[in-house]
Amino acid sequence: MNDVLYMAWRYVRFHWGKTVLLVSAISLVLFVPAGLHVVVEQGAQTLTARAESTPLLIGAKGSAVDLTLSALYFRPPNLSSAKFREVHRVHGTGLGLGIPLHLRYTVRRQRIVGTTMDYAEFRSLAVAEGRWFGLLGECVLGAEAARALGVGVGEYVLSSAGSAFDVAGAFPLKMPVVGVLKPTGTVDDEAVFVDVKTTWVISGLAHGHDNVNTAREGDKGVLEREESNVVANATVLSYTEITQQNIDSFHFHGDPDSFPVDAILAVPTDRKSGILLRGRYEEEGTTVQMLVPSRVVNEVLETMFSVRNYVILGSIGVGVATLMTAALVFALSIRLRRREIETIRKIGGASRRLRGMLASEILLVVFGGVVIAGVLTVGVSRYGDVLVHFIGS
């Protein structure tokens, strides 16, 4: 038997080009449906876990999927903003806790999440180094965000500037990093956490100014000074950094209850409170909606599973065609080797051993394809979440 396997191995090794093509085709035919199944299952588990840990979501009326993915995975919001008063509305019912999320800005590619300390407790986030933000303008980095930005406690990050069409007056804000979080394996690792009021500063709803009250007429930034009035020009710029010296000069323009938040995590005290809270938001004519994230995610998964099934069905069809082509290649190869086979028979090769050698060649090729497909599938099962994140980004 060893001599049969040796002869088969020498043949597939000598004709390495044909062997590589056949092994690659077989491995891909086996890997595509198996790998797709693994990736979809892992994605479904991740989506479901994050959604089930979030009882309720509140946001502006519109696409439920957009609101859910934005709030759970910090995607750029596509809906209009809700008002901060909705947070007080949840608190006022006595049925649960409202946690605001402001998601309009970034530090490079890392999403700035404006929220409150309640979010850290809700997601069980722990600081690995430093502390949580305590003052306006301070930020805390997720583990992956700290690595991607290459900064740590005691250093600074700069928020993204507003677009050219941003009439709210958003400007870059230099923020001190006061803490880095422990890894959680979730999207929280990639976020830059700040107090929600800090995001309002970035959007231009709150800012500080140079102190012109003590300046004299003719000084830089002063057009005219009267007894109780100072007229300043445009050179008096808003601060881009909040420090101990200027923090008292920062003030809000308007009613903070009317300021924007992109989503609100509603955490009811118990199941009954959750049902009652949902009833409060069933009124018609309101500008906000309340969602159950797990239901929205399940609807997304149903669509994803349907697409997966069609792709797998198509892959099976392609696989059958590929295997038939491989069988044709083997058949033609045996036909072309007729003189070689006749020579082996004339020198005393038994028909049983000859058939064993040809079967061994086929089995070696198929075995190689199965092994490679298995290795690829194991790799996807281990690093599938990284692959999905890379593709999504």
Image (cartoon, helix red, strand yellow):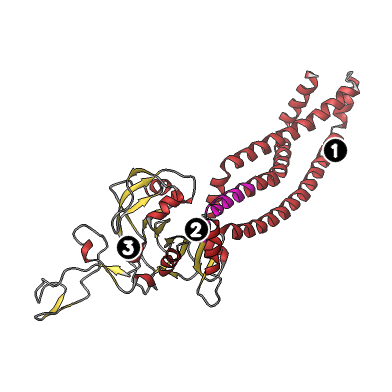
For the residue labelled by badge 2, is the local secondary structure a helix, a strand or a loop? strand
In depth, the one of 39 and 17 nearer the eye is 39
Q: Which span of residues is magenta-colored?
A: 41-56
For the residue labelled by badge 1, is the local secondary structure a helix, a strand or a loop? helix
Q: Main secondary structure of the magenta part?
A: helix
In depth, the one of 335 and 194 nearer the eye is 194
Nearer to us of marks 2 and 1 is 2
Residue 176 sits above or below residue 103 on the image: above
The residue at 41%/51% (across/down) is: 120
Q: How many marks?
A: 3
- Label 1 amino acid? Ala
Q: Quadrant of residue 192?
A: bottom left
Q: What residue does disc 1 label?
A: 331
Q: Is residue 48 magenta?
A: yes
In the displayed structure image, the side of residue 156 where residue 184 appears, left or right: right
Q: What residue does disc 2 label?
A: 268
- Label 3 vs 2, first from the N-terminus: 3
- Label 2 amino acid? Pro
Residue 14 sits above or below residue 60 on the image: above
Q: Mark 2, residues whose alpha carbon is within 10 Å: few (<14), some, or many (≥20)?
A: many
The residue at 42%/54% (across/down) is: 119
- Label 3 amino acid? Pro
Residues at marks 3 and 2, CA–CA distance in whole angstroms:
36 Å
Label at residue 133:
none
Residues at marks 2 and 1, CA–CA distance in whole angstroms:
68 Å
